[in-house]
Amino acid sequence: MYQMYQMHQMDHPKLDSLHMRSHNDDKSMRLTISAFILFLLAAAPLTSLANQVFRVSVDVNTSQISTTDYEYLDEFGPLIKEYLETNSWTDDRFLEVEHIHVNFQIVINSVDDRNFSATMIISTERPIYNTMQVSPVMIINDNWDFSFSRSQNLLFDTYQYHDIASVLDFYAYIILGFDYDTYSEKGGDDFFQSAQQIAELGQSAGSGWTSSGSRRSRSDLISQLLNPNYEDYRIALYRYHRFGLDLFTSQPDQSRDNILEAFEMIHQSQRRTTGRYVFDLLFAAKHREFRAIFMDADTERRLEAYNLLTTIDDSRISEYERLQR
């Protein structure tokens, strides 16, 4: 089993970022993460080294429409799950314990013939090393207009726009980009580039891809992620997860200091930019976790966290006020 793990480690960029590329990691961190992954591999069957990347759950809520003529919507959730789980989104090979867990909550708001309007929430999570816990990585809310008919199939083709497949393609690459960014510095670049290509295809479709009033678009999201002015934000994601969460059980004080540095990097990125979409996504997913990390910290660290968090996430000051007690 150990030899199989070592071979896989050499092939997998996420593990590569943990063991090979992160030359600033100290030895104890590498050993901690190695031991944890080996523990997971021992606890879970090594089913295969197939290219499945995602483990997907989909909930489709049709309570706002009459389903008398649309009972075939029962096919929609399974279609999304199959499409995301069976396509090869990357050449990297994932063990079962490495699959990215993704949850879709889709509310069908209205329908005109076979044209549907929906609200979608996508959430993902990441394991915290040396624990059995997970950390939320991303929560995205989006409006989605699409056409859907009985027994419909989806074709994976990133060069041709489709109002269902292209949205799923876009978010698959966004999810991968965020996930890889938490394992290595700007590790999600290639995936974000792929998402940008799909966003360019979607520009002519309009709905969801271009800004409308105060509504943020998918193009807004990817343009911020690839904008050099947001680079500190992305590096902060890496440092927060790798040198914060992943260190926490063994070195809580050092972990908190590293997280405070990540907060400062986010602050610097905010000062250089005007768009807040990526920041709002971060705080929507992480604000309770941010607060919880410092609840048991010493007074100095707790107050420093309060001052930084109320500066970079001023819409949730009441959430962070507990750090003052």
Image (cartoon, rainbow, N blue to C red):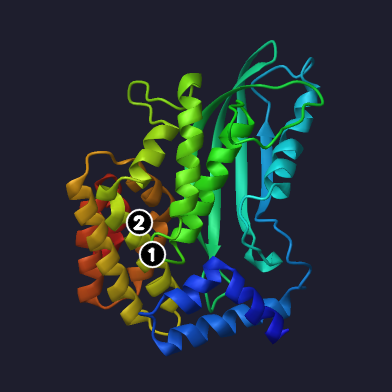
Residue 258: % across, % down: 30, 73
- Disc 1 residue crowd, few under 14, some 14–19, many 20+, Cα 10 Å: many
Residue 234 is labelled as: 2
Q: Residue at x 73, y 84 (%)?
A: 1
Question: Residue 42 or 21: which is nearer the viewer?
Answer: 21
Can the viewer see residue 325?
no
Q: Residue at x 70, y 56 (%)?
A: 52
Q: Amino acid at mark 1?
A: Glu
> On the image, which quarter does residue 55 sit in?
bottom right
> On the image, which quarter does residue 125 sit in?
bottom right
Is disc 2 in contact with disc 1, using a CB cutoff of under 8 Å? yes
Image check: 81 left or right of 202?
Answer: right
The quadrant of the picture occupied by the C terminus is: bottom left
Q: Secondary structure at mark 2?
A: helix
Q: Is residue 233 above or below residue 205?
A: below
Image check: 312 left or right of 237?
Answer: left
Foreground tag (2 vs 1): 1
Residue 95 is labelled as: none
> On the image, which quarter does residue 43 sit in?
bottom right
Q: Residue at x 66, y 64 (%)?
A: 94
Residue holding disc 1: 185
Residue 305: % across, % down: 25, 65
- Disc 2 residue crowd, few under 14, some 14–19, many 20+, Cα 10 Å: many
Q: Residue at x 42, y 78 (%)?
A: 247
Q: Is residue 77 above or below residue 55?
A: above
